[in-house]
């Protein structure tokens, strides 16, 4: 968790022949962000429009309301270098509760796009989640999801409760992030979004993604 995001140039709403893109963008050009690094050419004229969409899409894909409320729902994390062998970044879960009561986010639709600030050219980029994020502090969450995926591959048809039962108390509650039913359900939904698994009647099966 969350997602690697890709923005793809799909159209020029303005007159690109009369007012050609000064940055030299062409239809099909792409920019990706994995939670740590951008890949692709980023025009200064679209940074202000692009970044808010990247942040929201990165955190929750096309289901902002459904997913963002459960981010770190399991509790508060603390720095612990000895735990790096588990999550890749060195955190463990604390027993201190962390409430998200009252947090409400708007539901945002699919098919997002942003447009560069040059109205004469108006380059339109479609933005979408294409993979799970692996960069920066998302590494621990990614490792959790890959661990769950391995259990699903070994035993297709697992439910959330089945998955939780595959981990001992230390693995569920001390390794970062803490595995709660809500968080596992969220992780499964995210993995299904990008093809790692398929969900059928509350059960998880391997998907078609290698």
Image (tube, rainbow, N blue to C red):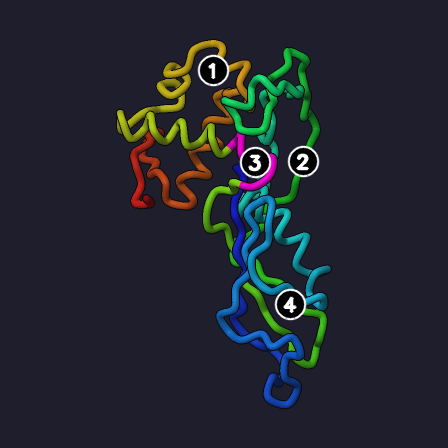
Q: Which residue is mark 2?
A: 104
Residue 111, position as x, y percentages in the image: 52, 58
Q: Nearer the viewer, mark 4 or mark 1?
A: 1
Measured in 3D between alpha carbons, the distance from the residue under mark 4 to the one under mark 2, in whole angstroms, is 27 Å
Q: Is residue 163 above or below residue 210?
A: above
In the image, 141 versus 207, the foreground residue is: 141
Q: Earlier in the sequence, mark 4 or mark 3?
A: 4
Q: Which residue is mark 4?
A: 115
Q: Secondary structure at mark 2?
A: loop
Residue 160, position as x, y percentages in the image: 40, 23
Write the start and end of the magenta stretch as one range: 135-141
Q: Which residue is mark 1?
A: 171
Residue 157, position as x, y percentages in the image: 28, 28
Q: Earlier in the sequence, mark 4 or mark 1?
A: 4
Measured in 3D between alpha carbons, the distance from the residue under mark 3 to the one under mark 1, in whole angstroms, is 18 Å
Bin the neighbour count of mark 1 within 10 Å (Cα to Cα): few under 14, some 14-19, many 20 and up: some
**Residue 61 drawn in magenta:** no
* Residue at 41% over, 18% down: 164
Q: Is residue 32 visible?
A: yes
Q: Nearer the viewer, mark 2 or mark 3?
A: 3
Q: Nearer the viewer, mark 4 or mark 2?
A: 4
Q: Are marks 4 and 1 in contact (CB under 8 Å)?
A: no
Q: Are marks 3 and 1 in contact (CB under 8 Å)?
A: no
Measured in 3D between alpha carbons, the distance from the residue under mark 4 to the one under mark 1, in whole angstroms, is 44 Å
* Residue at 46% over, 51% down: 130
Bin the neighbour count of mark 4 within 10 Å (Cα to Cα): few under 14, some 14-19, many 20 and up: many
Q: Earlier in the sequence, mark 4 or mark 2?
A: 2
Residue 136, position as x, y percentages in the image: 60, 39
Secondary structure mostly seen in the magenta stretch: helix
Q: Which residue is mark 3?
A: 138
Bin the neighbour count of mark 3 within 10 Å (Cα to Cα): few under 14, some 14-19, many 20 and up: many
Q: Is residue 76 visible?
A: no
């Amino acid at each position: 968790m969350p997602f690697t995001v890709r923005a793809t140039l799909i159209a020029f709403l303005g007159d690109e022949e009369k007012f050609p893109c000064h940055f030299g963008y062409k239809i099909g050009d792409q920019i990706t962000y994995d939670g740590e690094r951008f890949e692709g050419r980023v025009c200064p004229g679209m940074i202000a429009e692009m970044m808010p969409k990247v942040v929201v899409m990165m955190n929750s894909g096309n289901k902002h309301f459904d997913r963002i409320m459960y981010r770190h729902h399991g509790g508060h994390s603390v720095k612990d270098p000895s735990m790096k062998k588990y999550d890749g970044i060195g955190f463990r879960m604390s027993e201190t509760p962390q409430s998200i009561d009252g947090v409400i986010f708007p539901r945002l639709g699919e098919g997002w796009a942003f447009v560069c600030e040059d109205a004469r050219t108006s380059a339109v980029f479609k933005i979408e989640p294409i993979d799970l994020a692996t960069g920066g502090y998302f590494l621990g969450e990614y490792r959790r999801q890959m661990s769950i995926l391995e259990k699903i591959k070994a035993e297709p048809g697992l439910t959330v409760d089945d998955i939780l039962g595959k981990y001992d108390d230390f693995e569920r509650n001390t390794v970062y992030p803490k595995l709660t039913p809500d968080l596992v359900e969220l992780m499964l939904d995210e993995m299904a979004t990008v093809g790692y698994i398929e969900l059928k009647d509350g059960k998880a099966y391997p998907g078609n993604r290698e």
